[in-house]
């Protein structure tokens, strides 16, 4: 038979099982640390004075969490270097979040293992474990197309509004990346209020916000399957829920704020529907505004808070509890009212585990909002209660709209908004990763009992 020499390599130690949450925390934590240090440097500020470490940390968290809450005007405080750092931070916080831990593992020089591919396909909806890397590249291409297209379109729009060519170049880059990643940062000095009657600017920014908020998964799925009816339930719910929320919110703002001279009343009559649509887009995902938020009626602020809590789509650049979670909660409530033990959505049965996850995410958001609002109410005296809750939900929903409470509050009060932004951005993802990781099933089953409700 002959003699054969066989060389065997020493086997690698198997990677310990987990959810992948630690990789997410470490990866974004390192980025946050670097961003805070860079923003603290003297040349990051316009006056070449070192920014206070707390202010730099708050701004870095807001940028990385693509929130948009600021402690001072972005244009007047930060230099070009500081603004460039912000662009990188909310590009990582938006695009990096969409691409998930695949980007983090690439940055750390690691290779994707079977468990990592499984985790990504489970949460981000990749077609299969073997296609996850190809899927991540498609996400990057998806973002690149919209951002570059948005930069070109915004440059043309800004130049047509007599903005200098050099300024228009940087404004178009900054606002295109900020809008697609739903960051809400603006360097015009007055948000988008100067463009309240500029239809091209509002339409371009709205388009970037919407597609960044719903993410690449539904768009790529629709392109691949070429039929709405063949889409998976997740994508259908994202499209339908987003459309319903946009229509309802647009009509609501037209009716409630149409006669308010400080908000929609500032726009020309023909532009008011577009401004109302723009204000319907931004509260759920991004912090841009074409009207004065502080001048809105209280009922409009309350409606804004509802939209901010809902947010965008899972795997997109937006925050909130996500439209899929909101939709599943609605279908679960309908099933409970009918006395059904099965939750159905658009003709499909939804696993109870998904319903439990949706309830958990929603209750966590409400709990964090309650505690953060209570803290701000205790530490801030001059603000009205609705304005305090507005800014808290803006932080949790990673929206960035503010009534001015954030800027006026003390550092003790502002400190609570940092964990609120972090939990609002990464909380739903970490919860899903923890709840879907493999666990040993218990062989013990507790006796069944019931409680009284109502």
Image (spheres, helix red, strand yellow):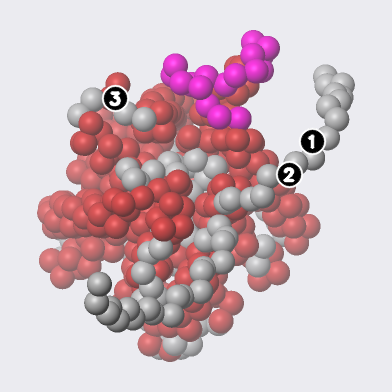
Residue 442 image label: 2
Q: Quadrant of the N terminus?
A: bottom left
Mark 3 sits on what residue? 230
**How far across and how far down the image is residue 192, in percent?**
34, 51
Please give the name of the residue rendered at 64% of the width and 50% of the height, measured from the top-left corner: 439
Which numbered circle lies on residue 445?
A: 1
Single out the residue that lies furthest toward the front.
Answer: 1
Q: Is residue 222 above or below residue 122?
A: above
* Residue 309: quadrant of the picture: top right
How much space separates mark 2 and mark 3, taking CA atoms? 38 Å
Foreground residue among 311 and 43:
311
Mark positioned earlier in the residue sequence (2 or 3):
3
Residue density around tag 1, few if under 14, some if 14–19, many if 20 or more, within 10 Å:
few
Disc 1, disc 2: CB below 8 Å? Answer: yes
User: SS at mark 1?
Assistant: loop
Query: Is 274 situated left or right of 348 in this image?
Result: left
Q: Which residue lies at the image location 54% right of the left edge and 32% below the top edge? A: 326
Q: CA distance from mark 3 to mark 1?
A: 39 Å
- Magenta region, residue range: 336-352
Residue 126 seen: yes
Q: CA–CA distance between discs 1 and 2?
A: 8 Å
- Residue 257 horizontal side relative to residue 420, left or right: left
The spot of residue 104 in percent (x, y) is: 41, 68
Q: Position of residue 342 (x, y in %)?
A: 60, 19
Q: Earlier in the sequence, mark 3 or mark 1?
A: 3
Circles 3 and 1, Cβ within 8 Å, touching? The answer is no
Residue 301 figure quarter: top right
Task: Please tell me whether residue 322 belongs to the stretch shown in magenta.
Answer: no
* Image coordinates for residue 263, horizontal then vertical, percent: 43, 39
- The residue carrying pointer 3 sits among few (fewer than 14), some (14 to 19) or many (20 or more) residues within 10 Å by Cα, namely few
Is residue 353 left or right of 269 when viewed as pictured? right
Helix, strand, or loop for circle 2? loop
């Amino acid at each position: 038979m002959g003699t054969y020499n066989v060389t065997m390599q020493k086997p690698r130690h198997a990677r310990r099982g987990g959810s992948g949450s630690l990789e997410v925390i470490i990866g974004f934590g390192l980025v946050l640390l670097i961003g805070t240090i860079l923003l603290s440097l003297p040349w990051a500020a316009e006056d070449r004075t070192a920014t206070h470490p707390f202010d730099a940390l708050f701004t870095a968290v807001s940028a990385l969490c693509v929130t948009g809450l600021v402690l001072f005007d972005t244009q007047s405080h930060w230099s070009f270097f500081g603004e460039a750092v912000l662009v990188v931070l909310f590009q990582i916080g938006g695009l990096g979040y969409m691409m998930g831990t695949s980007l983090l593992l690439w940055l750390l020089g690691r290779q994707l293992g079977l468990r990592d591919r499984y985790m990504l396909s489970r949460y981000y909806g990749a077609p299969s474990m073997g296609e996850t890397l190809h899927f991540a590249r498609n996400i990057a291409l998806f973002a690149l197309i919209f951002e570059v297209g948005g930069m070109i379109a915004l440059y043309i729009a800004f130049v047509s509004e007599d903005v200098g060519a050099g300024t228009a170049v940087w404004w178009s880059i900054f606002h295109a990346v900020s809008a697609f990643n739903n960051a809400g940062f603006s360097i015009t000095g007055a948000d988008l209020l100067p463009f309240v009657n500029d239809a091209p600017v509002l339409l371009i920014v709205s388009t970037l916000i919407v597609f960044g908020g719903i993410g690449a998964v539904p768009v790529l799925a629709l392109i691949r399957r070429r039929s709405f009816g063949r889409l998976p339930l997740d994508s259908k719910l994202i499209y339908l829920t987003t459309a319903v929320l946009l229509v309802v919110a647009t009509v609501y703002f037209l009716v409630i704020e149409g006669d308010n001279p400080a908000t929609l009343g500032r726009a020309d009559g023909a532009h008011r529907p577009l401004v109302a649509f723009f204000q319907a887009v931004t509260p759920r995902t991004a912090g841009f505004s074409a009207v004065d938020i502080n001048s809105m009626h209280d009922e409009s602020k309350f409606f804004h808070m509802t939209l901010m809590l809902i947010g965008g789509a899972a795997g997109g650049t937006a925050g909130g509890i996500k439209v899929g979670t909101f939709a599943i909660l609605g279908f679960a409530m309908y099933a409970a009212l009918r006395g059904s033990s099965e939750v159905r959505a658009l003709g499909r049965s939804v696993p109870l585990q998904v319903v439990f996850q949706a309830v958990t995410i929603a209750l966590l958001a409400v709990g964090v909002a309650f505690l953060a609002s209570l803290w701000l109410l205790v530490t801030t005296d001059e603000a009205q209660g609705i304005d305090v809750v507005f800014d808290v939900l803006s932080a949790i929903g990673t929206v960035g709209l503010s009534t001015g409470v954030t800027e006026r509050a003390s550092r003790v009060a502002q400190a609570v908004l940092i964990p609120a932004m972090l939990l609002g951005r990464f909380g739903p993802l970490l919860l899903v990763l923890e709840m879907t990781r493999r666990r040993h099933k218990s062989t013990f089953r507790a006796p069944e009992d019931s409680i009284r409700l109502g």
